[in-house]
Amino acid sequence: MSRHIDYYFSTISPWSFLGHAPFLAVARAHGADVAFRPVALGPVFAETGGLPLSKRAPPRQHYRLLELQRWRVKRNVELHVHPRHWPFDATRADQMVIAALQAGLPVDALVARIFSGVWQRQENLADPDVLAAIADEVGLPGSTLALASEGEPAATAYAENRARALAAEVFGAPAYVLDGEVFWGQDRIDLLADALASGRAPYRPIPAE
């Protein structure tokens, strides 16, 4: 029986971008079932004690910039540390992925292309016309998905993803939840791979005696 991974991410997250391809490679190598779950990070941070980037202490902000440079070398990918159209409201982009899922369409190429649009091509992902063109580029119905991304079904699913993330004790992105066990951060993909390879039961928090 295949293992199940809930994949929580946001198109606004550079760490989600850095981990996207390596994560999918690991999941496929182990035959794991992946549920794509775009999630709004602001509310998740607010409800789990995290801070938005602008409110973090300067040393934390500076360290993030160091890590982005390190990891773009480690992952061997192009990444603009300060992309032209960032930060942006990721709601439309995240909900376009949801709209495609709701339409029964494949989203692997769409998510990868959206990430590239933010972090490599410096496109304005808050613009629905840009999103429509991206979807068209990967063979999906761009105008239809752009419209659906602003509809109630996509918004409802987006809110449900947030509630599901909080129930799973997810507090940031990317988070890979393997049969209920949370692996937070693209730097935990090796540990996820180990868990899949071993076939062990999910770890759970150990209460103090």
Image (cartoon, rainbow, N blue to C red):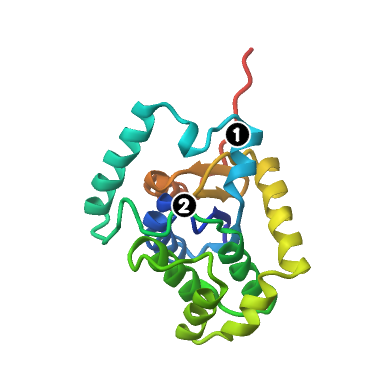
Residue placed most toward the observer, 167 or 57:
57
First in residue order: circle 2 vs circle 1 = 2
Tell me the residue that label 1 is attached to: 204
Q: Residue 143: where, in percent of width, then height? A: 61, 84
Residue at 61% across, 80% down: 105
Q: Is residue 1 visible?
A: no
| Residue that extends furthest to the top in the rendered view of this protein | 209
Residue at 52% across, 50% down: 176
Q: Amino acid at mark 1?
A: Arg
Q: Quadrant for residue 120, please give it.
A: bottom left
Q: Quadrant of the C terminus?
A: top right
Is the residue 207 above or below the residue 74 in the image? above
Disc 1 packing (10 Å; few <14; some 14–19; many ≥20): few
Q: Residue 82: where, in percent of width, then height? A: 33, 51
Label 2 close to label 1 by CB (< 8 Å):
no
Q: Residue 138: where, in percent of width, then height? A: 46, 83
Question: What secondary structure is marked by label 2?
Answer: loop
Disc 2 packing (10 Å; few <14; some 14–19; many ≥20): some
Q: Residue 166: where, in percent of width, then height? A: 67, 41
Tell me the residue that label 2 is attached to: 87
In three-dimensional space, the C-alpha distance between marks 2 and 1, rounded to whole angstroms, equals 35 Å
Residue at 65% across, 83% down: 144
Q: Amino acid at mark 2?
A: Pro
Residue placed most toward the observer, 197 or 152:
152
